[in-house]
Image (tube, rainbow, N blue to C red):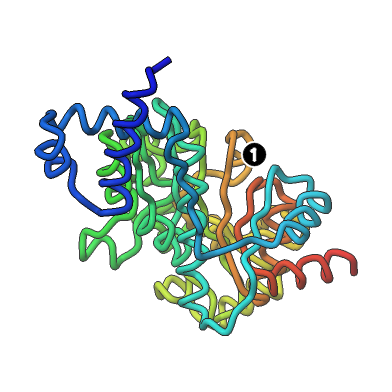
Amino acid sequence: MPDQDRLETIAEIARYYYEKNLSQAEIGRIFDISHSTVSRMLKEALEEKIVEVIIHYPFKTLPSLGKALVKKFNIKAAYVLPGSDANYTELVENLGRYAARLLADVLEDGKILGISLGMAVAATVRHVKITKPMHVRVVRLQGATDNEIREGTDLAQALAAQMGHDVMIIPSPWVMKSKEARDLILQEHSVQEVIHMAEEADIGLVGIGSTVSSFSTILHNKLTTEGRLKDLEAAGAVGEICGKYFDKNGCILDVDFNDRTISIELEKLRDFETVIGVAGSVNKAKAMIAAMRGGFVNILVTDSEAARRILELSEG
């Protein structure tokens, strides 16, 4: 154990650093010690409980709603943020900020992380901060949109850059014009290789799409029309992940759109250790219910209004 004099010195150094906001270099000059010694003593201050850090996060969750979702759908965890007057864009940004913390907590060195597309996934990636050294392979769970192909933007690349590992992207458009074109693309070795890696992922981060036109990533990317979206709804679709539509029970639908999509098969998500689904708003409640029933997500990040609607609909 450190002696009393050393503990007092450590406490003084901690006071200068945390209360007076002096830099480690300035403290080193005052105490005539090196920058590395100051850093080591500040670490020791935490270890010896001389300094305790309390983080007040701006977003609190509602544990009772989260527990109700876990019990109802037998998932690993659910995190429910309080509802607010925020618009949908702000809501998604807040959900992404919270999901980013969860993702950083579950990531470990040597893991494979598979990610989909969508506003919620993009918001999560923007807020992820990797603070410990790790090498995580990031792989896309689906092909690219036309915008990504034209602009070269990619969420997987942005995430992989933080984790010092390579990224694997399916070298194909997300949706093909026909089933025959999709089948031809799937015969390409480079496409097969990435899809196989995606299906072997340990952790998944996915958005949950809706058949409500104003909340549809598919429609937003001009991969379908409102009329065809209504046809999917008439066929029983309530939501999609990676462009694969499913019904209210989480069963994958036998529809043309699914036959033209380049992505992993959703059933493979059930083999992942963790799949974090990020989605908000009552308009996506049915899609979230189906995603949990289908076993495609086992951790849900959503808002309180959506959670209450989910529980209400699932009782009915």
Q: Furthest-front residue in view?
A: 5
Q: Nearer the viewer, residue 234 or 28?
A: 28
Identified at 81% across, 65% down, the residue is 311
Q: Is residue 7 left or right of residue 241?
A: left
At which x and y percent is residue 228? 56, 77
Q: Quadrant of residue 282?
A: bottom right
Identified at 67% across, 55% down, the residue is 291
Q: Is residue 282 left or right of residue 309?
A: left
Q: Furthest-top residue in view?
A: 1
Q: Secondary structure at mark 1?
A: helix
Identified at 37% across, 46% down, the residue is 185
3 versus 26 height, above or below: above
Image quadrant where one finds the C terminus: bottom right
Identified at 34% across, 57% down, the residue is 144
Q: Is residue 156 left or right of residue 72?
A: left
> Identity of the amino acid at label 1?
Arg
Q: Nearer the viewer, residue 284 or 127?
A: 127
Q: Is residue 145 left or right of residue 82?
A: left
Image quadrant where one finds the N terminus: top left
Q: Nearer the viewer, residue 85 or 22?
A: 22
56 versus 202 height, above or below: below
Whether residue 196 is visible here, answered yes or no, is no
At which x and y percent is residue 77? 68, 47
Label 1 Cα neighbours within 10 Å, binned few <14 / some 14-19 / many ≥20: some
At which x and y percent is residue 126? 35, 59
Whether residue 53 is visible here, answered yes or no, is yes
Query: Circle 1 is placed at which residue position?
Result: 270
219 versus 5 height, above or below: below
At which x and y percent is residue 308? 77, 70
Q: Quadrant of residue 210?
A: bottom right
Total numbered badges shown on the rendered structure: 1
